Image (cartoon, rainbow, N blue to C red):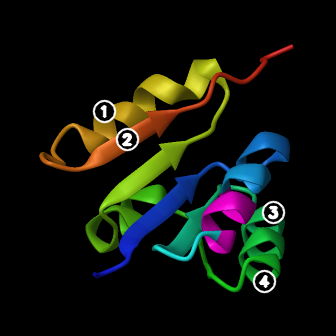
Amino acid sequence: MDKIKVGVIGVGYLGRFHAQKYAAMEDVDLVGVADTDRASAERVAAECQSRPYYEYRQLLPLVDAVSIVVPTVTRTSRASGTSAWPGRATTWRRTSTV
């Protein structure tokens, strides 16, 4: 069976855990992680043996599913970027904006 190709958008505190869990799953290929904070994207990508992306739209064509783990105030803009992405799975993680 083919592995599910997954990406994580937003790899701050909680997004890092999403990436770690996906990287540990045998039936999942963590294709990449995306974050506007280049240092965070590079750190988590290296930790999870994946690839960093600094613009989430670059990651979308490469994956079957994505976790969007960004603050609520930016989630709508990220979600609208996935609306032209039919037939793909999206998971959401609510994060605090305090």
72 inside magenta stretch:
no
Residue span colored magenta: 19-24
Mark with earlier residue (2, 1) = 1
Mark 1 is on which residue type?
Ser
Mark 4 is on which residue type?
Ala
User: On the picture, is 85 further left or further right than 76?
Assistant: left
Mark with earlier residue (4, 3) = 3
| Disc 2 to disc 4, C-alpha distance | 23 Å
Q: Is residue 43 above or below residue 78?
A: below
The residue indicated by pointer 3 is: 40
Q: Secondary structure at mark 3?
A: helix
The residue indicated by pointer 1 is: 80
Give the image quarter of residue 8. bottom right
The residue indicated by pointer 2 is: 90
Mark 3 is on which residue type?
Ser
Mark with earlier residue (2, 3) = 3
